[in-house]
Amino acid sequence: MFKKVLIANRGEIALRIIRACRELGIATVAVHSTADANSLHVRFADEAVCIGPPPSRDSYLNVPALLSAAEITRSDAIHPGYGFLSENAEFAEVCAKCKIGFIGPRPDVIRLMGNKVRAKEAAREAGLPLLPGSPGVLKSADEAVEVANEIGYPVILKAAAGGGGRGMKIVREPKAIAQAFATASAEAVSAFSNGDMYLERYVEKPRHIEIQIVADTHGNVVHLGERECSVQRRHQKLIEESPSPGVSPALRAEMGRVSVEAMKRINYSNVGTIEFLMDENQRFYFMEMNTRIQVEHPVTEQVTGIDLLRTQILLAAGEPLPFTQEQITMKGAAIECRVNAEDPVSFAPWPGKITAYSAPGGLGVRVDSAAYENYVVQPHYDSLVAKLIVTAEDRPTAIRRMQRALAEYVVQGIRTNIPFHRAALDEAAFVEGVYDTRFVERMQASEAGTARLKRAIEETP
């Protein structure tokens, strides 16, 4: 087992890792930029090292600084959290060369799944269902037209090295492909330094369903059910829940089965998430795989009772899985709302000092956050302030509990999207569980949705 873990991250996920390590008896080292000197992860870790100025490239993405911090503190492992270097195969390789444990999958698997085209090829070989599309990277816009004409419109162009909705364009007719291809490729170069594109059929009303995978280095793989992640804006998730109201027990078993079999074929280890698009007929298609802990992992923890961070650390240390598939059960319902420092209408970032802060509580309420009164939400990083998670015996009760918790949440001095969440959970489509990835667009476009959001803004403290 590791003796000391350096946490190459910040905010709530850094705190979450510290808590898991402390319960395992592992010492922790927090790294931080100068902007994060007063952050809670710095306060609660056993040691802290400043690794640079506020810009991520000079601090949390500064590999030499991270490795130097690990060396001077004699850390024998690094946990990357999510974001930053969590899916950087080169960083994982450097850690291995320096004889520092990387709490995540092997570098070759990270590299494989990091390239969307190669990941789709691997998924096809592993038996996962795929949407019709280009067999590999498109050589030109003309080839994109040929493929699109063959599979039918609408289609979606995607960046091979992409994620988070960047480098993606929906095309509904042949004459629009050339411009869309050029624009998406330019976005991909800017975001990922890689302009390679691929194409696949576009599903008009998809649900975004993901399967949580847990695997050890001894060949054992299990799944922990699904998470519904369809409430998104600009491909960024806002609300997640488990189990999904659109997935039946039989479909859950099938999605889990094909996911586990695929991970066994590629010899995957540690935690990971396989993301699927599901159409209106409950046909599901592989989209991508995230080789890290997910932001929304708490909803899976709440319905299964399994500590994913603790499990992740044990697996990275070579421990076998402590449970079998038959021992895993899902109980009740959990919902997570991402509380972001942003305008609830435009979603524009809203950094600044929190002048008053009071988190909700009570039975079934969990808050994962690094915020506190007088904490400054930095403009340099992601706008996430907190993850508010509720758990209840059933979905209707979980929705009511989340509404109650949101009404109690006080964050003043900045704007947050709490009013958006209050309005969204009142939408009939969400309450009935019949929503898809265009839920937010429809809510913003409807008079009732706009009125509901306006009322929520007025009622939020």
Image (cartoon, rainbow, N blue to C red):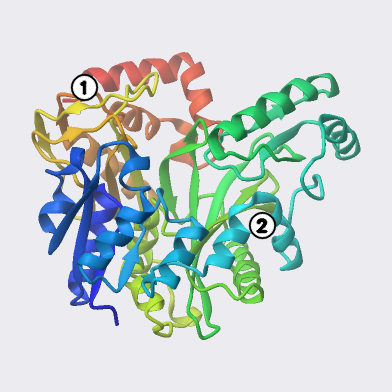
Q: CA distance from mark 2 to mark 1?
A: 46 Å
**Which quadrant is the N terminus positioned in?**
bottom left
What mark, if any, has residue 389 been given in the picture?
A: none
Which x, y percent locates residue 197?
A: 71, 39
Q: Is residue 381 above or below residue 243?
A: above
Q: Nearer the viewer, residue 295 or 282?
A: 295
Which x, y percent locates residue 245?
A: 50, 50
Which x, y percent locates residue 127?
A: 73, 67
What mark, if any, has residue 459 been given in the picture?
A: 1
Which amino acid, mark 2? Ala
Q: Nearer the viewer, residue 399 or 129?
A: 129
SS under mark 2: helix
Q: Nearer the viewer, mark 2 or mark 1?
A: 2
Q: Nearer the viewer, residue 260 or 10?
A: 10
Who's the residue at 43% across and 30% down the image?
A: 427
Q: Nearer the viewer, residue 458 or 354?
A: 354
SS under mark 1: helix
Which amino acid, mark 1? Glu
Q: Are marks 2 and 1 in contact (CB under 8 Å)?
A: no
Q: Is residue 358 visible?
A: yes
Q: Which residue is the site of mark 2?
A: 119
Q: Is residue 8 visible?
A: no
Q: Residues within 10 Å of mark 1 (few under 14, many from 20)?
A: few
